[in-house]
Structure formats: C-alpha cells, structure tokens
Image: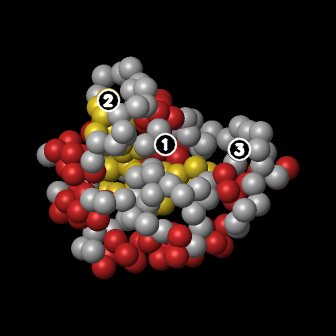
Amino acid sequence: MSARALFLDRDGVINIDHGYVHRPEEVEFVPGIFELVREAVDQGWQVVVVTNQSGIGRGYYDVSDFRHLTDWMRARFVEQGGRIDAVYHCPHHPHDALPEYRLACPDRKPEPGMLLRARDDLGLDLAQSVMLGDRPSDLEAAHRAGVGIGLLFDPDGDQVLPEWDGVARIRSLSEAVTWLG
C-alpha cells in the first residue's frame, strides 16, 4: 500500500517568509506548524517539504547553508514531537540566477518535479496526498503531479485560488488538520 504525504512549502508555511531565510536566527515559525506536523505524523502521514530556493541560485547563500538550516529545522520538529521525512529543494531560476543555476528546471514549482521525485523515492500515493502552500504556484505543481488536495494558506484571503477540484483556502494552519482526517 502506498503512503499518503503532507507536502509543505517551506517559506510562508513552515517559517514566516522574511525573504531568503538561510540562518537559524532568521527563522520565525508559522503559528500552528508544529501542531499540524505532529497531527500528520500521529495519523501516519509522511511529511515532505518541497521548496524553491532561488536564493542559492542567486548567490545569496549556498547549498551547505541550506542543508545546515534544514537540519536545524528538522531537529526543532523532532523536539516538538513531529518529524520531516524528506526535503526536496530547487535552487534554479529561469532568469534571475547565476549562470550555473539559470535554467527552467522541472523541479521548480509550478513544475511538479519535486513531488514526482518524492513519489518515486518514498512510494507515495499522490492522489491521496495533500499539498499545503502559500502561493498558487505551489498548488499548480501539486495539480500537475496529481496530488488530490491542495490547500492555499492565505491568512489575508487576497490570493487567487486556482480552479481545480480539491482546492481550498485556509486562513490558519489549524484548519489544515481537518483535511488530514
């Protein structure tokens, strides 16, 4: 039997997006994220982060900075009774990046590459999975990958909700728990 996954965008869902966050002292966790992840783990979901990280491609920080912060964040989830099972990132940008990172990558959301790799690596049933993002491009990637439910975390309610079955807007992370049951 394939596993279900709760896919999470990072900046704007796990941590407040202050712009190119890459050091632990810059991290401010979004209220409710630890409780959501703990509930997902308790219900047997895999928790997978899929995050565009063009700050690497732009030269603002490097892959080792990203890995260090990722390890630090994962440890915070363990301390809070949850876990992050896998993290996928895309450092590329089609225009605004250093030459070695300047490309239209199939992993960069709204493309579905990171979700498809997670499916293959972890044996996930994407149709039974949930993507939680703070931008329509997060949900577009999920839709292209065949993820069953897309949740747009939009506290202000001012983003355009993509039009496909299985999409909903949530204003707090506590609302996402109901979609896991």
Left-right relation of 49 to 42: right
**124 over 161 or under it: above or below:** below
Residue at 33 percent across and 38 percent down: it is: 151
* Quadrant of the rendered image containing residue 78: bottom left
Provide residue 158's location: percent of width, then percent of height: 40, 31
Residue at 65 percent across and 73 percent down: it is: 64
Mark 2 lies on residue: 167
Provide residue 111's location: percent of width, then percent of height: 56, 35
Helix, strand, or loop for circle 1?
helix
Amino acid at dot 1 = Leu
Q: Residues within 10 Å of mark 2 (few under 14, many from 20)?
A: some
* Contact check, label 2 and label 1, Cβ < 8 Å: no
* For discs 2 and 1, the disc positioned in front in the rendered view: 2
165 and 13: which is toward the camera = 13
Provide residue 55's location: percent of width, then percent of height: 67, 56
Mark 3 lies on residue: 93
Helix, strand, or loop for circle 2?
strand
Query: Colour scheme of this structure image?
Result: secondary structure
* For discs 3 and 1, the disc positioned in front in the rendered view: 3
* Contact check, label 3 and label 2, Cβ < 8 Å: no
Amino acid at dot 2 = Val
**89 over 149 or under it: above or below:** below
Query: Residue 140 got which mark?
Result: none
Helix, strand, or loop for circle 3?
loop
Judge whether residue 57 can be spotted in this image. yes
* Quadrant of the rendered image containing residue 126: top left
Left-right relation of 31 to 55: left
Query: Residue 116 got which mark?
Result: 1
Residue at 21 percent across and 45 percent down: it is: 175
Amino acid at dot 3 = His
Provide residue 95's location: percent of width, then percent of height: 77, 39
Q: CA distance from mark 3 to mark 2?
A: 26 Å
